[in-house]
Amino acid sequence: MAGNSFGTVFRLTTFGESHGKGLGGVIDGCPAGLKIDLEAIQKDLDRRRPGQSAIVTQRKESDQVQFYSGIFEGETTGTPIGFLIPNADQKSKDYSHIAGTYRPSHADYTYDQKYGKRDYRGGGRSSARETVCRVVAGAIAKQLLGDVSIQAYVSQVGNMALDTPYGELNLEEAENNPVRCPDPEMASQMEAHIREVRKSGDTIGGVVSCVIRGVPAGWGEPVFDKLHACLGGAMLSINAVKGFEYGSGFQGVTMRGSEHNDAFNPDGSTRTNHSGGVQGGISNGMDIYFRVAFKPVATLLQSYDTIDKEGREVTVQGKGRHDPCVVPRAVPIVEAMAALVLADMSLLARLSQI
């Protein structure tokens, strides 16, 4: 299987399956001498872990990361950083009923077509549990980035959308409720809606918005490795993501150029920021902001029609422990992938100045 690595200089390679002994990774390219805050890493893991509230999957995992190399006396050594997160609460029997059938809109059918074999226990390598490795690496990338601030939050669940501009929100409020929406009233409504959807055995999608502050002008490349293209690729690599837009996004098509252009101030900043902090594929020093759309979870806890390996039509009853809506737990994953892109871009920018 190819495609298990992400990044150019700051590079993460992950391994493991949802129901294996554990998941882990190797981080290459992290400079020596970076002081590592282990508590900050664990805090991000706790934000992603299952079982943290009544509106997420009830799989019980402590997600305690174990580092095996690359960190000595609290600092990086410049060598590969190896880590492992053990699995503790697998219930593989919950998936035995789909060993020979394909769940609609899941990776079951495509895995069989590509590899001729699949691990049906929780989806194996296709499981969103793989993202636990990204959160570890992303937490280290955040520390490498120093004063760069990356804050993601839930801005939509189903048809319930928070339209308030991010500059008018206290984004710190997002961590004060299980939905991770910075508007307490909207968060309460979203939580009630997720509970209602879950009770019916169904699922719902949503949007995670992200704001990045403190990126200097000059990160990113003008052709294939555009900063926004790399961010988009990173976000679209996350399980269940169906869309990515940055800056004015699709709404920008309704504007005229005279409205959409970001006029300059004498210091190089811009009066507006429809560009979303990126122009010509390169950061311009303004806030970078984007939105990531997540589909409803494909696994339903109700009966559904599908086919088996022989192409016969069958009816299957969903089982197991699953998120009715992924966006609350996706917030730290979005932040992690953004941090991995930016850490890579920061190191590439240093190399371009040598």
Image: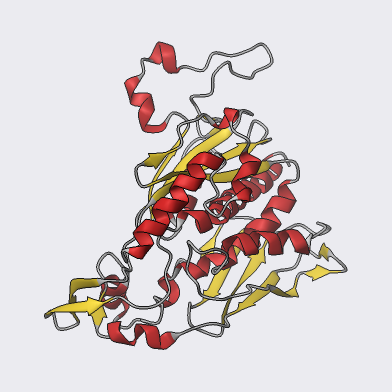
Q: Is residue 200 left or right of residue 285?
A: left
The residue nearer to you, when weighing 16 against 241, is 241
Q: Nearer the viewer, residue 173 or 312?
A: 173
For the C terminus, which image quadrant?
A: top right
Residue 225 in sight: no
Residue at the far left: name it. 312
How many numbered marks does the figure carry? 0
Q: Is residue 188 above or below residue 17?
A: above
Residue placed at 19% from the left, 81% from the top? Answer: 308
Q: Judge left or right: residue 276 versus residue 150.
A: left
Q: Residue furthest right?
A: 73
Measured from the top left, where is residue 116 in percent x and y?
A: 29, 82
Q: Is residue 195 above or below residue 58?
A: above
Q: Position of residue 318 (x, y in %)?
A: 30, 75
Q: Quadrant of residue 323?
A: bottom left
- Quadrant for residue 113, please give it: bottom left
Side of 292 relative to 120 (left or right): right
Q: Quadrant of residue 137?
A: bottom right
Report if residue 156 is visible in the image: yes
**Above or below, 222 relative to 269:** below
Q: Which colour style is shown? A: secondary structure
**Residue at left offset 65%, top offset 59%:** 44
Could you tell me residue 92's position as x and y percent? 42, 86
Residue 7 at what x, y percent from top left?
A: 57, 56
Residue at left offset 34%, top offset 42%? 159
Which image quarter is the N terminus in? bottom left
